[in-house]
Image: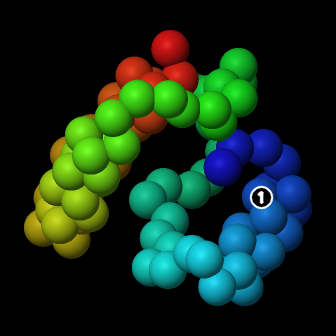
Amino acid sequence: IEGPAEAVAELRALIARDMRHAELMTVADGEQSSRDFASWSLAYSGTAHFVAREIERIRAAIHSEPYHSQRDLRRLLGELSS
């Protein structure tokens, strides 16, 4: 989620209360000069199995390799938003 801090916090709280979501994790936070996914509509069509495998691989490594996991997640999201 990208945007103003208050809006992000409010949306994250809504998502956390939604029973359809589990294991909500913040990978990175803080301010930056520009948005990484400003034009992404959050629509995705394609094979969900690939995405699920990649996210699971990244999630499994988040504690042992936080820098690489954050980089890999940003790369995956960048590919999906192109």
In percent of width and height, residue 4 lies at: 83, 48
Rendered view: 20 above or below 42: below
Inspect this view and state whether residue 69 appears. no
Residue toward you, 44 or 25: 44
The image shows residue 66, relative to residue 41, as above or below, that is below
Q: How is the image coloured?
A: rainbow
Percent coordinates x, y for residue 69 in the rendering: 25, 50
Q: Residues within 10 Å of mark 1 (few under 14, many from 20)?
A: few
Q: Nearer the viewer, residue 13 or 45?
A: 45
Q: As rendered, which of 62 and 80 lies closer to the eye?
A: 80
Residue holding disc 1: 8
Residue type at mark 1 is Val
- To which quarter of the image does residue 47 belong? top left
Residue pictured at 87% horizontal, 62% vertical: 6
Residue 8 visible in the snapshot: yes
Residue 30: x and y in percent read 61, 52
Name which residue lies at 41% across and 29% down: 46
Residue at 23 percent across and 59 percent down: it is 56
- Give coordinates of residue 2: x percent, y percent: 69, 44
Compared across the picture, whether 18 is left or right of 37 comes to: right
Figure check: 45 above or below 8: above
In the picture, measured across the screen, residue 34 lies left or right of residue 14, that is left
Q: Residue at x 40, y 22 (%)?
A: 79
In the displayed structure image, the side of residue 81 where residue 4 appears, left or right: right
Q: Nearer the viewer, residue 65 or 47?
A: 47
Image position of 31 (left or right of 64): right
Residue 20 lies, with reference to residue 59, above or below; the image says: below
Of all residues, the one furthest to the top in this rendering is 82
Q: Of helix, strand and loop, which one carries label 1?
A: helix
